[in-house]
Image: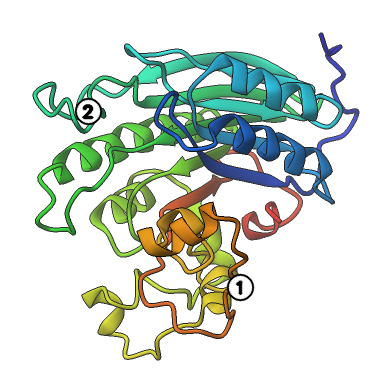
Amino acid sequence: MASSIIPSEPPTHIRLLTLNCWGLKYLATYRHERLSEIGRQLAQASPPPEIVGLQECWTQQDYESIRDQTRHILPYGKFYFGGIFGAGLAILSKWPIEESSMYAYPLNGRPTAFFRGDWFVGKGVACARVRFGPGAADVAEVFCTHLHAPYEREPNDSYLCHRTAQAWEISKLMRGAAERGHLVIGLGDFNMLPSSFAHRLISAQSPVRDVWRELHPDSSLGAAINPVEQARKRPIPSAEFNLLENGATCDGAFNTWRWSKALQKRLDKGEEITINKDEADPRAKRLDYIFVGDGGYAPRVPCSSLVR
């Protein structure tokens, strides 16, 4: 057990990390190996992350593996339970977690769509109150979530109302934290595009900002093949540009799990495949987000400088 050591002064910067681990038990390929490697990469990161939100970390065994490897930099952690098969959510922290709770989304899929799985898992918001300084307001309220998956492109996605309702629920939680005068951190796989109604809803209904858009204000609003992005009349981005400027990790050229079956078979045979970082990457999009809000707590530096 880690001893509760509260810093004598609050930090001026907080390094945040969010990751969907794709760790569904029995179904995720190379689950044990990948989750173990995720723990190793976190442990070796330089500079190390200080607050981490994980999604689709479904088994306590995988969580404990990551905890064991990162305990020296992230001594505090919480694995959240929910639904029939678990919540798949975890929060790790450099600083003490004073309080935690799990908020289940009231609307989350259909039980008849058993092949989707969303209804059966405990989707919701993992909440943790992190003490990063001695003052009464030196508290960060962390919200880690994974919104309902889209199975069709908006506006034809029949689960759009589910995801929108979930965006509304987490926006209320973040707004409440801000009203308490705490630093607000919302992070996770939101399964939405920066141009979506769910994104605008969160930004409008809670006093938080999309950190990536703050640091990269000209980044894409969707994949290059998306009508919203096509309307901007930008050239199709390269794989490297998508990663470094657009923050796009889903369906990108560097995401081997989204490659064609033919390419994946070549990988399975041990063939080494090199991706040209300059090749056109029209399908990559950003679904992962970090939202930060100052609330009533006045930081020493602007909000956009709080995250690196």
How far from the left and from the top, in percent, is residue 52?
64, 36
Q: Say which of 278 and 94 sits in front.
A: 278
Q: CA distance from mark 2 to mark 1?
A: 39 Å
Is residue 137 among the parts visible in the rendering? no
238 on left or right of 32: left
Q: Say which of 252 and 178 sits in front.
A: 252
Name the secondary structure under disc 1. Answer: loop
260 on left or right of 19: left
| Residue ranking furthest to the front | 269
State which tag comes first along the sequence, 2 or 1. 2
Quadrant of the image containing the N terminus: top right
How far from the left and from the top, in percent, is residue 141?
57, 29
- Up the image or down, 194 lies above or below 34; here it is below
When asked about the image quadrant of residue 95, the answer is top right
Quadrant of the image containing the C terminus: bottom right
The residue depicted at 51 percent of the width and 35 percent of the height is: 178
When asked about the image quadrant of residue 7, the answer is top right
- Up the image or down, 187 lies above or below 251; here it is above
The residue depicted at 59 percent of the width and 63 percent of the height is: 271
Which amino acid, mark 2? Asn
User: 10 Å neighbourhood of mark 2: few (<14), some, or many (≥20)?
Assistant: many
- Residue matched to label 1: 274
Mark number for residue 255?
A: none
157 on left or right of 252: left
Mark number for residue 108?
A: 2
Name the secondary structure under disc 2. Answer: loop
Is residue 217 among the parts visible in the rendering? yes
